[in-house]
């Protein structure tokens, strides 16, 4: 395969009558592009209910091939709205395309995908490109909580935090949807206001700290990381979820494992829950057995992981 930049080839695919499932994920059929039949594509769609019976559509496009990186322009269109994503390091799924339904703008079920394909890219070239993209995000700590160039205010617990739409939208499709749907203005007409009602103020500051610096504070305690994980799961901040899981996996102890499991019970992190339940069972002598059983019964997945870990322990 020649990795040099090639002249572009375009293809268009329309996914008719998308069978949306509320809060579920659906996939289109695979489709290809001329001269590159060894590369396959498919659309991933997720429709989530938000507020006032409005929905948010999260769309991604996947490229499936034996090579890791590709250069392409991807455009997703629904009704009369369209968004284009240009990438020089397309590995698997694209970034999330976010469409918002309102009471006066209910999207039809068809999704159109246009791809302009430039070919595959050498790994080193793609990594340099990703590094430059990361720098745009991670080299912004001086804007953390700053009113400089701020175009959005986040209201939490009657307090407010200055932020920037480009950062919030890059990390969280839910916040991206909130920005698009909520047109509340402040005294300054150039600054928008959004309200967060289900996250504590200090947890929101942790989330923003990660978005602007790429890390949480060095000495943050496990109970706080668990709360950040819950918020990251709720607002679909995937990179922060992975960061929190890694941090919690390294600091779970007998004195905090029950709290971590209790706090994160509603999160979609099955592998982490399975490992944590296994740790609990392996150290069951430090706990009251009835307490452990009550924890296991709190969810079907917990009970399944408990039984599996208990059987592994016996063997």
Image (cartoon, grey):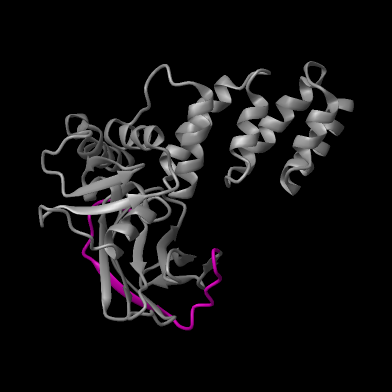
How many labels sit on residues? Answer: 0
| Residue 110 percent coordinates (x, y) | 41, 81
Q: Which secondary structure class fits the magenta region best?
A: loop
The C terminus sits in image quarter: top right
* 59, 256: nearer the viewer: 256
Q: Is residue 132 above or below residue 79?
A: above
Name the residue at 34% across, 60% down.
177
Residue 213 visible? yes
Residue 176: quarter of image: bottom left
- The percent coordinates of residue 108 (x first, y second) are 41, 82
Q: Quadrant of residue 10?
A: bottom left
Q: Which residue appears farthest toward the right when viewing the image? A: 314
Residue 54 screen position, x and y as percent = 42, 71
Between residue 149 and residue 76, name the one nearer to us.
Answer: 149
Q: Residue at x 30, y 38 (%)?
A: 127
* Residue under the point 44% across and 65% down: 41
Q: Is residue 254 left or right of residue 191?
A: right
**108 to the left or right of 310:** left
Q: Nearer the viewer, residue 288 or 112?
A: 288
Query: Magenta segment range?
Result: 1-23
Residue 73 visible to an observer of this rendering:
no
């Amino acid at each position: 395969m020649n990795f040099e930049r090639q002249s572009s080839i375009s293809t268009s695919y329309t996914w008719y009558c998308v069978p949306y499932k509320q809060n579920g994920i659906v996939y289109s059929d695979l489709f290809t592009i001329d001269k590159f039949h060894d590369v396959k594509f498919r659309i991933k769609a997720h429709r989530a209910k938000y507020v006032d019976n409005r929905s948010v559509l999260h769309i991604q496009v996947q490229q499936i091939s034996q090579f890791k990186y590709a250069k392409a322009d991807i455009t997703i269109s629904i009704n009369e709205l369209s968004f284009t994503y240009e990438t020089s390091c397309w590995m698997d799924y694209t970034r999330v395309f976010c469409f918002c339904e309102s009471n006066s703008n209910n999207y039809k079920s068809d999704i159109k995908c246009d791809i302009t394909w430039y070919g595959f890219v050498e790994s080193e070239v793609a990594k340099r490109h990703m590094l430059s993209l990361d720098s745009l995000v991670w080299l912004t700590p001086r804007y953390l909580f700053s009113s400089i160039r701020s175009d959005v205010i986040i209201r939490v617990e009657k307090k407010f935090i200055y932020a920037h739409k480009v950062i919030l939208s890059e990390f969280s499709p839910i916040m991206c949807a909130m920005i698009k749907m909520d047109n509340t203005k402040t005294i300054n007409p150039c600054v928008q206001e959004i309200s967060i009602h289900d996250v504590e103020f200090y947890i929101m500051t942790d989330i923003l700290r990660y978005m602007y610096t790429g890390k949480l504070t060095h000495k943050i305690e496990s109970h706080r990381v668990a709360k950040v994980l819950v918020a990251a799961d709720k607002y679909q901040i995937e990179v922060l979820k992975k960061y929190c899981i890694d941090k919690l996996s390294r600091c779970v102890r007998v004195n905090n494992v029950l709290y971590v499991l209790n706090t994160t019970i509603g999160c979609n992190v099955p592998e982490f829950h399975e490992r944590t339940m296994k740790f609990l069972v392996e150290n069951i002598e430090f706990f009251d057995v009835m307490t452990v059983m009550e924890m296991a019964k709190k969810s079907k997945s917990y009970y399944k992981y408990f039984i599996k870990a208990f059987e592994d322990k016996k063997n």
